[in-house]
Image (cartoon, coloured by chain):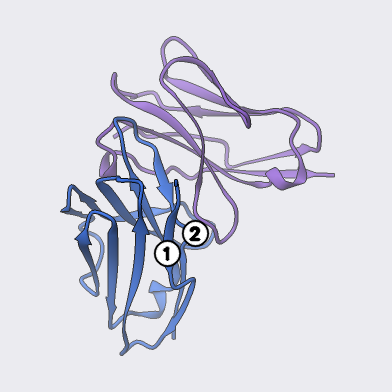
Amino acid sequence: DTEVTQTPKHLVMGMTNKKSLKCEQHMGHRAMYWYKQKAKKPPELMFVYSYEKLSINESVPSRFSPECPNSSLLNLHLHALQPEDSALYLCASRGGRTDTQYFGPGTRLTVL
Amino acid sequence: LAKTTQPISMDSYEGQEVNITCSHNNIATNDYITWYQQFPSQGPRFIIQGYKTKVTNEVASLFIPADRKSSTLSLPRVSLSDTAVYYCLVGAGGGGFKTIFGAGTRLFVKA
């Protein structure tokens, strides 16, 4: 099973809402990632959990909050987002000694 | 960080072979070279990975010269469904912030 699943597929939220994105993998990978991708741009790495230890892209605002409940699950908590946060949010996991990442289908987020 | 440089876009016709070259002049000794394909509104999909010389799988070949400062993804006999963005990534097993997506190459396959 080389699948990474993400829910929901689409999310529309207001600037005062609190929502969460979810990601799951069952490949036994110990590294998981959140990326943000704007239209016609490459994915931009936001957060990395490696063996459940968090690394942060310092440019990501605090209204994004990651959580790794266990090695198979990854959440991204959203609060007080801005319209410019509208994007495709991708989750990926990586395992083994090489740098192969397996991506989920993404969550299309729209902030009104 | 090993920065990568690719052509911004390429056009091709169905049935042709397409070669996309990626430059990575400061590749480190333990870095692998990985190519991904991405369709609109989908996550990137792993295509092929190599360390040196040539690697071939059922969808593509990857050519890496001896100095490893560049690599070429070869797609044989492309079809319309190969229209996508192709990313070359260079990194070691540490992944994460040591491996950054470059701008990618937009391949457009015409009938």
Which colour denotes chain B?
purple
Indicate the amino acid at tag 2: Pro
> As drawn, is B16 to the left or to the right of A56?
right
Q: Position of residue A99 (x, y in %)?
A: 35, 35
Could you say which is closer to the camera, residue B35 or residue B4?
Answer: B35
What residue is disc 1 on? A6
Residue A101's disc number: none
Identify the image quadrant of the N terminus of chain B.
Answer: top left
Residue B32 lies, in percent from the top left, at: 37, 26
* Quadrant assignment for the C terminus of chain B: top right
| Left or right: B78, with B53 as reference point | right
Are the residues flagged by discs 2 and 1 in contact, CB closer than 8 Å?
yes
Q: Is residue A25 above or below residue B74?
A: below
User: Is disc 2 in the same subunit as disc 1?
Assistant: yes
Tell me where residue A67 sits by quadrant: bottom left
Residue depicted at x 76% and y 30%: B77
